[in-house]
Image (tube, helix red, strand yellow):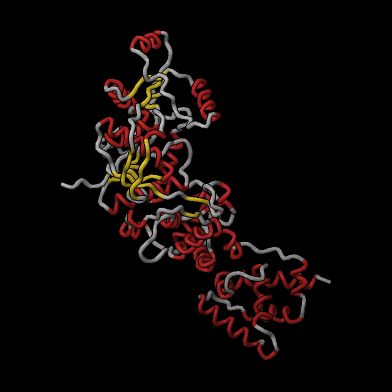
Amino acid sequence: MIMRPRVRFAPSPTGHLHIGTARTALFNYLFARHEGGKFILRMEDTDLPRSRRQFEESICEDLRWLGLNWDEGPDLGGLFGPYRQSEREKLYQEETKRLLREGKAYYCFCTQEELERRRKEAFLAGKAPRYDRRCLNLSQEEKKKLLKEGKKAAVRFRIPAGKIKFKDLIKGWVEFNSEIFGDFIVLRSDGRPSYHLAVVVDDAKMAITHVIRGEDHLTNTVCHILLFQALGYPLPLFAHLPMILGEDGSKLSKRHGATSINEYRKQGYLPEAIVNYLALLGWSPKKKEVVNLNNLIEDFSLERVSKSPSIFNLSKLKWLNREHLKLKENKEILKLAFPYLIAEGIIKDKFNKKKMLQAIEAVKLNLELLSDVPSYVKIFFKEASLSKEVLGFLKNPNSIKVLEELKETLPAKEISFTEAKDFLRKFKEKFKNKGLTTRDVFLPIRIALTGESSGVELFYLISILGHDESLKRVERVLSQVREIK
């Protein structure tokens, strides 16, 4: 029987979900779903001073918002729980004792100050700043004496000599010499496990078959393989994803744009667009670029993950967001943009839903973010204030004639977009023989109705504003123009 893949996403709840971390979660999720396996969520919260339950909740909320639902986790439980490392410490201590018994680990009584001093000395001497194994050969009597005196001890893993070679599912064969690694800590002096020990024990006990993470973990993987072997655990397969860089080639940071999923949500990005874009960072689809989560699951494979770093391009993300907005029904856009419309005072206790949906239809192709909706639709709900310069532009005989004619001929009944198009076509024809261009006719109307020289198609304005509102705006502008001396 072939075991279906089990992958895990294991964030530290010390902050909000970062865009790069979300990409790791996505690739794990896509691999699991494509292969019919399990996607496990595990919280690496052993950094107690910095870990917060509020960040765990934020991470979970963002994952759900992206559509990356897990099969086992802190909230769901499962056969291999608990799924918080802070609740598994007894297990780590038991495995540490086993390493000590088998001579694969040893107590280290060196203080942080001593270690720091030796690191500096090694650096000045041109040597690699790794642990010098000072405590490795302490006798049993010396250890007992130090422990009896109350001196705190960490536990270090004894790295065996030789080369470590493994096949990465993305990078191919990778080889390191163990000499470059110092004996690392597996259990801190306060009894908490190190990242290395907790990850290896959890991956083994949770039957993880594939470890998919960023290539910044490549050297960690070497340490983990040695621990897997020392503890007698079966090795999972490893896949290291390419780094995400800013457009200037440096490590992605806030200066390249928002870096947390939470921030992108606030700015008005769609989860579909973010998922779509994250998938393109280091992976290539077979066909089109604009795809949804189901398309990605069907198409995903680790074989098409790039070995090279990916460049984060905010313009590309915005383009994808625009494309996904175009695919949405107007009702859904209204629902999603509701908080932004309320915040801008365009929607209050009561509002004309039909008119709002028509307004969204009118501006839909211009939208880049959900947060853009208020600035685009406000022309249908709020009269603009025209400056003296703009009013001065309208104070010419041709513009006044156009607006006066519009006053007299505006359709008295509600008209559709198509009917509004037909009305404007006939209206323009009236001035053709008088030498007025399309711009001469339509620009004064647009300015009178919106206060802007460009924007949505005029037929949308005529149809959505209707007779009374259009007439009111035109009369107000004409009155202001006549007052100019």
Farthest right residue in view:
485
Residue 158, horizontal then vertical, whole percent: 35, 26
Residue 467: image x %, image y %?
60, 73
**Residue 348 visible to the viewer:** no
Q: Is residue 200 left or right of residue 441?
A: left
Q: Residue furthest bottom?
A: 433
* Towards the viewer: 373 or 253: 253
| Vertical placement of residue 130 versus 284, above or below | above
Classify residue 130 by image quadrant.
top left
* Observer-nearest of 341 and 128: 128
Answer above or below: position of 53 versus 337. above
| 222 or 477: nearer the viewer | 222
Left-right relation of 405 to 240: right
At horizontal 53% and vertical 74% (from top left) the residue drawn is 414
- Closer to us: 86 or 74: 86
In the displayed structure, 80 sits above or below 414; it is: above
Left or right: where 86 falls relative to 357: left
Question: Residue 100 appears in which quarter of the rendering?
Answer: top left
Quick check: 476 left or right of 187? right
Is residue 240 shown to the viewer in this render? yes
Residue 211 % position (x, y): 33, 43
Disc tally is 0
Q: Residue 376, position in %: x, y? A: 58, 63
Q: Residue at x 39, y 37 (%)?
A: 220
Is 91 situated above or below 109? Answer: below
* Quarter of the image where the C terminus is located: bottom right
